[in-house]
Amino acid sequence: PSVIIWSLGNESGYGPNHEAMANWVRQYDPTRPIHYHPAEYAPTVDMISFMYPPVAKIIDAAENDGDPRPILMCEYAHSMGNSTGNLKEYWEAIESHPRLIGGFIWDWMDQGLRQETDDGQVWYAYGGDFGDEPNDGNFCINGLLFPDATPQPAMEEVKKILQPVRIEGIVTNAVELAAGIRAVTGVRIHNRRCFASLEGLRATWALLEDGVAIQSGELELPPVAAGESAELTVPWEAPDPQSGSELCLNVVFSLAEDTSWAAAGHVVAAEQLWISKDASEGAEGAGHLASGTTRCPAPGAASTAPQVESSEEAIVVQGDDWRLTIDGQTGAMTSWTVAGVELLSAGPRFHVWRAPTNNDDTKRGEQQAANRWREAGLDRVEHQLVDISSETLDDGAVRVQVRSRVAAPDVELGFTCTYTLTIDGDANVLIETHVLPDEGLPFLPRLGLQMTLPGGFETMTWYGRGPHESYVDRKQSALVGLYSGTVDEQYVPYVVPQEHGNKTDVRWVALTNAEGVGLLAVGLPLLEVSAHHYTTEDLTAARHLHELQRREEITLNLDHRQGGLGNESCGPGVLPQYLLQPEETTFRLLLRPLTGEDYEDSMRQAQALNRQCRGGS
């Protein structure tokens, strides 16, 4: 450790005593600069310091030509619970303004006190759990590490944003390697270290098709000096991609040998470069969906038109070995059996509430998200059927249309939701949801569909960002790929249970049992997805880990979008571009049963359907 800066204290006001302290320091030790946050622009200090400033404030300060002093954020990016949004925007400002020298994230580690229940379940206590009054509640639970020192998902984002190597693709637009493929011939790397070269690092690359590596290799890495750049050729060969598939290039820098702080192979920097034209030109590699596509799987000659029976009690649509039931009084799907296996316990239905994060539930900031959501009744909406109808289309598919009013019983404002389900003979269910919010609603926590699956569909596989959770304002570290894990493994044990486990930019997700039988959801074009053995209500009510009781059923969220995380528990809220406004919205997704011979066969079915949708067949 080294001491390089004098500080006059912390959050202790500002006055003549501080000026006297600064004068004494300069006489005693003129070699070190002086910092003090509440002084801000006062001439007493050698650097301007802010605590939890909005991004716009540090930019304005950095562009003040009349003051040459460096600018430091002595605290920023408050990491309480599922948090640390907006980090990308802070560092875009820092890197584009020389006077901005960085900042200190608050905090390093949750200060929870380890407890055990009588049956040995570990949980962490905080203010008020010992009968202590007054207390500051869980305000000490604000770290990048959990109390047991394991990293939280936000740590991945910090690592990515601050990685010591910047990696940019070199694109030769004049060369077209194949239809729809950009010519990323190499990478330009920038050593962001201040003193050390890139010696000791190993560079590798992999070409991915729909999230799976099809080519890979190692790059010869020159010893790029601190602050310098170099260009490397990546020797990938243009494949013959299947229609609708996506290609990207992953470049990774890792430790070549063991060090005192990490073992060989530890990743220090990574970047994903899009090669598919449609993906690279879309939003964040969103992929392509042919315009005008009404139903991805075109009915084939072998497909048998489904049968439909309608009554006041239910609409039943069935094929050769499957049966789907929609309740005539509620408009909700209540059963979906395929080859004798029940896929559905409840839903899918319009869902707008999320278990508030610490940033949502704060009373310190300006947005006061959770307070506004509760006032609008978003935590207790009820679904009231307005009308329901069914018809058989010319191609034999069945269309069911459901219109519902979704609002809390004690609040006037709400939503009008129209679901249009198009069901073909192969049990493909295209769901188009039109949401019309009433004027006067606040920005929303989420907008999507929620459904419940029976227990047993424990393997979650998705093609999207991962493997850790990501959100619209905290997803740079989650590269697009094909990932798989159990539903239990998607749980993030925040000391105060809250919204967690979300995956962004998801092309498709499947929940399957040990035999590979399950349910596939394909985004048209993208979804945000999470799966839990807890309901949203369970996560909302619990204040400690041991208060959660695992359910056998699985809650599956298929969101059009969630709002951002922000930093408002002690800092700026969600940036305007990441707020989910209550606007008229239509979103689509496709559901299909998976009945492969085994898990691998079902995953091949999932990839094939995804490509079919993106190819516009």
Image (spheres, rainbow, N blue to C red):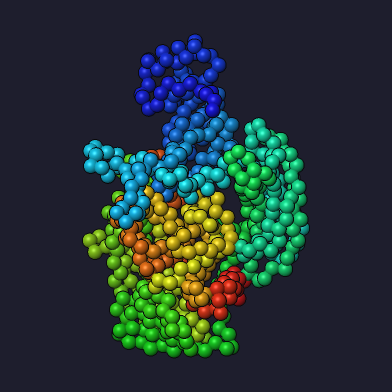
- The x, y position of residue 367, in whole percent, is 36, 46
Residue 450 image-quadrant placement: bottom left
In the rendered view, tell whether residue 588 sits above or below residue 202: below
- The x, y position of residue 124, in whole percent, is 35, 47
In the rendered view, tell whether residue 392 sits above or below residue 10: below
Q: Residue furthest front?
A: 119
Camera sees residue 392: no
Say which residue appears at 44% left-offset and 86% top-offset: 318
Say which residue appears at 28% left-offset and 58% top-offset: 377
- The x, y position of residue 270, in whole percent, is 62, 49
- Horizontally, residue 617 falls left or right of residue 215, namely left
- The x, y position of residue 569, in whole percent, is 37, 43
Q: Residue furthest top?
A: 27
In the rendered view, tell whether residue 564 sits above or below residue 311: above
Residue 365 image-quadrant placement: top left
How many numbered marks have been drawn onto this rendered protein structure? 0
Q: Quadrant of the N terminus?
A: top right
Residue 133 image-quadrant placement: top left
Camera sees residue 127: yes
Say which residue appears at 35% left-offset and 54% top-offset: 121
Query: Which one is in front, 313 or 117?
Result: 117
- Horizontally, residue 505 falls left or right of residue 314, namely right
In the rendered view, tell whether residue 393 sits above or below residue 292: below
Say which residue appears at 54% left-offset and 40% top-offset: 91
Q: Quadrant of the C terminus?
A: bottom right
Query: Which one is in front, 129 or 116?
Result: 116
